[in-house]
Image (cartoon, grey):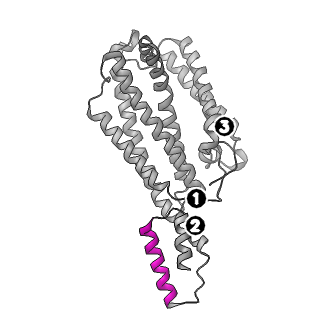
Amino acid sequence: MIDELDTALRARGVGWRARSRICAEFQDHLMSDPHAQLGSPEELAAEFAEVLGTSHVRTAVIGGWAALVCAALTYAAFVIGMIPHSPGKLQQGVLASKPFLVLGKSGLAGMAASVLLVLLPQIAFASGLLSILHAIRSRTRSTISGRDQVIIRRRMAIALAAAAGSIGSCIAAGILVAGRPFGLSAVLPAVTILMILGASLLLFRAARYRYPGETLHSTLVDDVCWIVPTRLRPNGTTLSGLVAVWAGVIVSLGGAVAGDPYDGALRSVVEAACCYSGYMLLGRYLGIRSSTEEVS
């Protein structure tokens, strides 16, 4: 029994210290009551993995969001630092996407950095927000199910990767245009990178727990409409379309405020297309697009 339990715990990714403690406790229990009905080793291992994984996932979500907030501050410092190098009304303090047009003068590298600076922060924000929304849904439960842990881990992993790419693009763009990162001291990006690495380690520790046989089934509706009665909920495709249109409207309003409604309208179409494309491309992996996937 004890050897089978140890093997089952190892298969679930439980570390040797936790395995030793669990096996010792069960061995003591069996010594006091050899005929105790404790359940099968596989069921016990699954339960312990879920409990331990819940603690690590919640810690990883907190660490991940701290890193994302720091990355957002770094990105804001970069955008503000670009204003003196940007044409037109941006020098008067109007923040829009036009400062990134300066990078177009730096060749292909500048154009690539400009595209990444627009896309990656949005991916980081959306994935991080979805991760914490899924965690909030589980706040009233003592444990988070294996499939929900997998979804949360995937979302936070994408968010941290996009945040790291955003910071790298900020540094590269600043060097291309001004020979140094805009508005960035040596401390701010270094702290951000360290926080992203720390959050990644927390996420890696949470990812060692495995839940074979669990079926992933989640949609965007489950995450953002959990307070809405079931009969009033839209389907996932409709909701993603509404979110894309809403994002486009916000971008269009930003262009109008900046005094260039035509440019704002064009960027709003691009923004909406990017939002919906992201839903279609990453939706199944992130658990926001209806699918049935068995965890390996």
Q: Is most of the magenta stretch helix, strand or loop?
A: helix
Q: Residue at x 52, y 59 (%)?
A: 209
Residue 235 vs residue 60, the one in the foreground: 60
Q: Please name the residue shown 42% across and 50% down the image.
A: 62
Magenta range is 15-31
On residue 146, the disc is 1
What is the number of the mark on residue 46? 2
- Please identify the quadrant where the C terminus is shown: bottom right
Q: Is residue 271 left or right of residue 190?
A: right
Magenta-colored stretch includes residue 193: no
Q: Is residue 142 visible?
A: no
On screen, residue 295 versus residue 119, left or right, reads right
Is any atom of residue 59 visible in this view? yes
User: Can you give x and y, in whole percent of width and height, for residue 270 in the image?
Assistant: 59, 21
Which of the two residues, 219 or 207, is positioned nearer the viewer here?
Answer: 207
Q: CA distance from mark 2 to mark 1?
A: 9 Å
**Residue type marked 2:** Ala
First-in-chain label (3 vs 2): 2
On screen, 198 above or below 113?
below
| Depicted 99 relative to depicted 285: above or below | above
Q: Which residue is rendered at x = 54% and y = 13% of the image?
A: 263
| Cβ atoms at labels 2 and 1 below 8 Å apart | yes
Residue marked by disc 3: 239
SS of the residue under disc 2? helix
Mark 2 surroundings: few (<14), some (14-19) or many (≥20) residues within 10 A: many
Q: Amino acid at mark 1?
A: Gly
Q: Position of residue 196 (x, y in %)?
A: 39, 42
